Each structure stands twice: as structure tokens, then as C-alpha cells.
């Protein structure tokens, strides 16, 4: 399963960003490979409007099944909910966020 | 000729200057384009003869007709659309929409997107003696004033002396007003706040290459902030309205600068602008 992470940085020991759609990096974590498989600098970070919509659209159209980040804004949250993509809210290191998410999902 | 009265900072005296100017000319057209808080009518006291509800086209999406190709979503530069192929849902964020119509234009399916009119404000037309009056009132909760401003322009008669009360700030609504003006009067107050915002607004006016000049409101003889500001930038101050109790008391009663002394000053100002002396 591919998970989207709104990262402040791009590696496991960096932080989950404080902002969802305007995060620093789009980080892709693969639960089978148990690692970050790709990342990209958020191209919409400095957008003037509708960034929440843009990023949520990106998530639902790039094969992500879940998203980890801070609380998303209302537009992002609404789109992800309608698309059936679970948002796992976490503040802290990406490593801890992933572990916590996986533990939660085992249950 | 069209003269826009702009400022940058709000509350510097755009309305008192523009209404005083219009009343001094007497057979002018006064247009209040400060549509988020139009209060020129308080000073002009016009008789309104016509009220027009103004609408913009807004798309409606039909999930039963949509093929979820996402063409509209990708074409929308304002990111107002989310097409969700997984669950066959469409989310439309009306507050982000700029009514450009591109979604309908790119849609390959008949009747999946239908544009419906949506009221966003009222345009009022009236008069006060020889003076023609037009103002716009934006509905509460409407994000962008620009469509209403652009719609108001249709009602401005050609060839007359037109005085436009511009919105404050330095964004799209100001650009919409200034872009087809012949001259811009920038009203400021001689405070760090007033001058900071004036500088930003001047940036727009200069970028648009509009002839302009500064009017200082609430001027005090011991305050040289505005004069220094203008001198340093090579800008011209063409009028200083004093910080006086009588002006403030009249203002509070809805009376603009209407005594003969000001009337003459404003008429001379207009003549100078017309003759290109400023």
C-alpha cells in the first residue's frame, strides 16, 4: 500500500509538516517495502489559492490509499473523505508517524 | 475623462475627496466602486431610479452525465473542482471559482456542466441634481468584487467627467478600477501606515503607467512625513486637507467638503488635470 506523507523533510528521521497541503515534500511510503520509495518537493506550496484542492486531487489520482500529515484544511479533508482515503493525523517524526499508523492498522 | 480616487490604506479619505470633487463639478458622473462598503451615497444623497441585480455564471455539475475524465479539473487554474473517479463524485468549491467558464468549454460531454446565473450584488443608478450617480453593493460573503466592478462599467455614460471612488488595497479590485482611468488621485494620511500602503498602491499605478498625484488628508503643519515621502520619490502632492474638527464634524453628519473655498480648489484641480498641468 502506498501512503502519502506531508513531510517537512524527505527522510524518515525528519518531521511531518505542520501544514498539510502547503507541506515541504510529498513523501511516498510503501508498506510492503517498509520504506520511503519516492519524494518530491511540493510544487504547489506557494500557490495563491485552492492549494488544498490541488494537493487532495494529487493524492486521489496517484494511487495513494492513505495520507499522513497534520489536520488537513476543510477542502482537502472533504475531498479525501469523499474519495475514501483515510487521513492519519500525526505530529512528530515521519518514522514515528509511519510506525504509529501501521500499528493502528494492524488492529 | 475618468479620474479614479484610490489610496492603498483604507479610511484615508477616498470617499470625502471623490464625493466633494463630484459635487464641485456638479454635472459629473460619480461612481462608487468601493463595493464592499459603498458609502458615497451617504454624502451625495442621490435619488435612486434603478436597481439592477447583477449575476455571474456559475457551473453546476451533473454526476450522472459526467465521465470523470478530469479535463475540467485540470483546466481550472483556480483549483475549484475535484473530480473523484474512485467514488464517482464531483466536488465544486464555489468560493474559488472565478466564473471563467473554462470547465464547460473543455467538457466533452453534453449537459454534464450547466452554467446557472448567481446573484453577487446590486448596481444602483440615480442622480442628484445635475450629478449622475452609480454605485455597486457586493453581497455579503462574495469573495471577489471584480466581476461586479467590471459589470458596473457598462452603466457609466461616455464622454462625461467621471469620478470613481476606488476600493482600498492594492489587489485585483483596484487594478480593475484603475486600468481604464485617465488619472489617479491617491489619497493618503500622513502616517507610517498610510504612506506604507500608499507606496504599494503607487507601485500598481506606476506599473500601469497612469498619470497620478497625491492628496494628503488630515494634514498638520508640524507633520512633514508625507512631504518627505513625496519628495524622496519624486511624487507630487497637489492638495493638503487639514486635520480640522469642523471637517470631521461635517463628515460625521454626511457633509463633504462643500464650502466655496474647497469647491474652487477642486475645480482648479480638475482643470489642471484636464490641461495636463499635473
Image: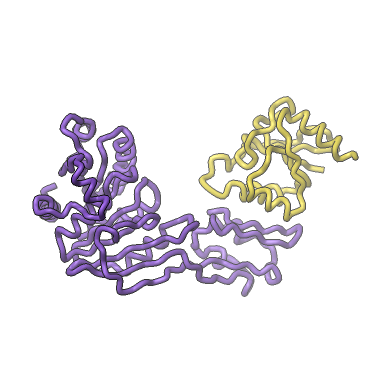
Chain colours: A yellow, B purple
Where does residue B42 sit, x and y in percent of width and height? 29, 59
Nearer to the camera, B175 or B49: B49
The residue under the point 83% across, 38% down is A31
Nearer to the camera, A71 or B255: B255
- A54 over B127 or under it: above or below: above
The residue under the point 19% across, 30% down is B224
Where does residue A21 sit, x and y in percent of width and height? 63, 42
Location of residue B188 (image quadrant): top left
- B175 over B135 or under it: above or below: above
Please identify the residue farthest to the top as the structure is shown: A13
- B239 over B108 or under it: above or below: above
Q: In which quadrant will I find the N terminus of chain B?
A: bottom left
Nearer to the camera, B51 or B72: B51
Where does residue B24 sit, x and y in percent of width and height? 15, 58
Please identify the residue farthest to the right as the structure is shown: A107
Left or right side of B79 for B15: left
Location of residue B160 (image quadrant): bottom left
Nearer to the camera, B115 or B35: B35
The residue under the point 77% across, 37% down is A29
Left or right side of A49 for B137: left
Q: Is residue B176 visible?
A: yes
- B112 over A51 or under it: above or below: below
Q: Is residue B182 visible?
A: no
Left or right side of B105 for A29: right
Where does residue B92 sit, x and y in percent of width and height? 61, 60
Amino acid at each position: 500500500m502506498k501512503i502519502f506523507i506531508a513531510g517537512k523533510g524527505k527522510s524518515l528521521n525528519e518531521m511531518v509538516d505542520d501544514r498539510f497541503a502547503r507541506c515541504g515534500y510529498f513523501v511516498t511510503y510503501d508498506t510492503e517495502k517498509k520504506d520511503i520509495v519516492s519524494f518530491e518537493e511540493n510544487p504547489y506550496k506557494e500557490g495563491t489559492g485552492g492549494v488544498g484542492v490541488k494537493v487532495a486531487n494529487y493524492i486521489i489520482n496517484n494511487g495513494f490509499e492513505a495520507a499522513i500529515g497534520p489536520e488537513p484544511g476543510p477542502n482537502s479533508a472533504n475531498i479525501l473523505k469523499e474519495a475514501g482515503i483515510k487521513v492519519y493525523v500525526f505530529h512528530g517524526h515521519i518514522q514515528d508517524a509511519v510506525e504509529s499508523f501501521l500499528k493502528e492498522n494492524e488492529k | 475623462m475618468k479620474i479614479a480616487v484610490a489610496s492603498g490604506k483604507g479610511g484615508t479619505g477616498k470617499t470625502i475627496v471623490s464625493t466633494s470633487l463630484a459635487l464641485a463639478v456638479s454635472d459629473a458622473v460619480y461612481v462608487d466602486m468601493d463595493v464592499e462598503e459603498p458609502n458615497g451615497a451617504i454624502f451625495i444623497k442621490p435619488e435612486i431610479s434603478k436597481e439592477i441585480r447583477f449575476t455571474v455564471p456559475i457551473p453546476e455539475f451533473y454526476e450522472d452525465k459526467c465521465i470523470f475524465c478530469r479535463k475540467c479539473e485540470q483546466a481550472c487554474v483556480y483549483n475549484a473542482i475535484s473530480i473523484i473517479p474512485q467514488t464517482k463524485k464531483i466536488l465544486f468549491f464555489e468560493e474559488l471559482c472565478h466564473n471563467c467558464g473554462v470547465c464547460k468549454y473543455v467538457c466533452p460531454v453534453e449537459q454534464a456542466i450547466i452554467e446557472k446565473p448567481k446573484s453577487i450584488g446590486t448596481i444602483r443608478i440615480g442622480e442628484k441634481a445635475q450629478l449622475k450617480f452609480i454605485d455597486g453593493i457586493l453581497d455579503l460573503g462574495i469573495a471577489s468584487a471584480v466581476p461586479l466592478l467590471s459589470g458596473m462599467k457598462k452603466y457609466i455614460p461616455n464622454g462625461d467627467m467621471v469620478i470613481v471612488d476606488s476600493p482600498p488595497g492594492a489587489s485585483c479590485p483596484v487594478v480593475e478600477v484603475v486600468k481604464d482611468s485617465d488619472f489617479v488621485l491617491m489619497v493618503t494620511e500622513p502616517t507610517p501606515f498610510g504612506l506604507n500602503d500608499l507606496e504599494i498602491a503607487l507601485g500598481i499605478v506606476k506599473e500601469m503607467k497612469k498619470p497620478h498625484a497625491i492628496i494628503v488628508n488630515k494634514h498638520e503643519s508640524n507633520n512633514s512625513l508625507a512631504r518627505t515621502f513625496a519628495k524622496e520619490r519624486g511624487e507630487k502632492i497637489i492638495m493638503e486637507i487639514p486635520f480640522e474638527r469642523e471637517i470631521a464634524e461635517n463628515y460625521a453628519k454626511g457633509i463633504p467638503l462643500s464650502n466655496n473655498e474647497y469647491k474652487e480648489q477642486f475645480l482648479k484641480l480638475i482643470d489642471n488635470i484636464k490641461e495636463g498641468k499635473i
